[in-house]
Image (spheres, grey):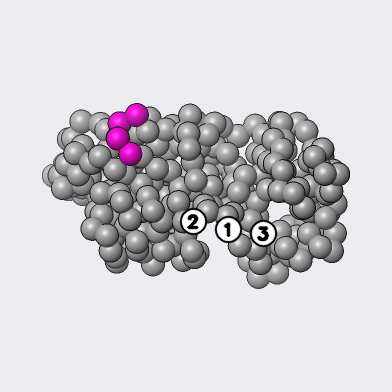
Amino acid sequence: MDLLDTPCPRSVTIQLSMQTVQRQRISEELRGRFESAKSVLVLTGAGVSAESGVPTFRGGGNTAVWKGMPFDVISSARMIERDLPAVREWFDYRRNLLQPLKPNPAHREIARWEKRFQQFTVVTQNIDGLHQKAGSTGVIELHGNIWRARCVDCDARYEILAGESCSEQCVSCGNWLRPDVVLFGEMLPRGAFELAAESAHECELCIVVGTSGIVYPAASLPEIAKTAGAYLCEVNPERTALSEHCDEVLTGKAGAILQMFTSAPD
């Protein structure tokens, strides 16, 4: 008999299966802290939205994403000054892609956690609004929201409904409207990071989900939480620059792993 045709011993199969389970198992320490915590902060990034099919558009190098322009050009503060209609058109296109997408199990699980803790804060780097669509409230949006427009002069904000394009002019003052998102070369929304940092400083448990941990100032939030004494957990498909600073790292899809926090232990 050829060696490749030799049946694998049952004990080996069981051992491999056990190793797979072990990699995905939440420690008793983390489970205990999750069950007893009164204050929890969850920081989410593009990895969470990717599980709903949200495209990143990043590409590599100078890859063109819109009418021959790279992502960091068409999505920049410089383009707002140079060609605002083109920027509005680009974000109209992105909203059309997002419209049929739905929250995934990670979004829904995080929304359920809101009722579990006395103080629960969701901070997101994503602009797609899927956390709110899943039922989360009071989400701190570090990079804004693609479903809103903002006046370039008076800062008035307007909701953009599904299927609609961004209006051109502000009803309040008549000036131009732009997407209410943080573009390359811009500061974060006034007060957003400060509020997130306060929650990070006060939390007992900080869970970082689907983010590379290298984009500042968002990447400093886990550092603030850890320095203040919080237990730090990372959930990501692969290890990141943040991993070595975490108390626990869980690798895999966020939707599957987050549900393990409230499921019965094996």
Label located before the other in sequence (1 or 2): 1
For the residues labelled 1 and 2, say whether their Cβ atoms are less than 8 Å apart: yes
Image coords of residue 203 (percent x, y)? 30, 49
Q: Relative to residue 38, is residue 41 drawn left or right?
A: right
Per the image, label 1 sits on a secondary structure element best described as loop
Which marked residue is nearer to the observer: mark 2 or mark 3?
2
Q: Relative to residue 180, is residue 126 drawn left or right?
A: left
Whole-Å distance between the Cαs marked 1 and 3? 9 Å
Whole-Å distance between the Cαs marked 2 and 3? 16 Å
Image coords of residue 68 (percent x, y)? 81, 62
Residue of label 2: 193
| Residue type, numbered disc 3 | Leu
Corner quadrant of residue 231: bottom left
| Residue type, numbered disc 1 | Leu
Corner quadrant of residue 86: bottom right
Label located before the other in sequence (1 or 3): 3
Mark identifier at residue 188: 1
10 Å crowding of disc 2: few (<14), some (14-19), many (20+) = many
Image coords of residue 5 (percent x, y)? 28, 48
- Most extreme residue toward the bottom, as rendered? 61
Quarter of the figure that contains the C terminus: top left
Residue of label 3: 183
| Residue type, numbered disc 2 | Phe
What residue span does the magenta drawing correspond to? 115-119
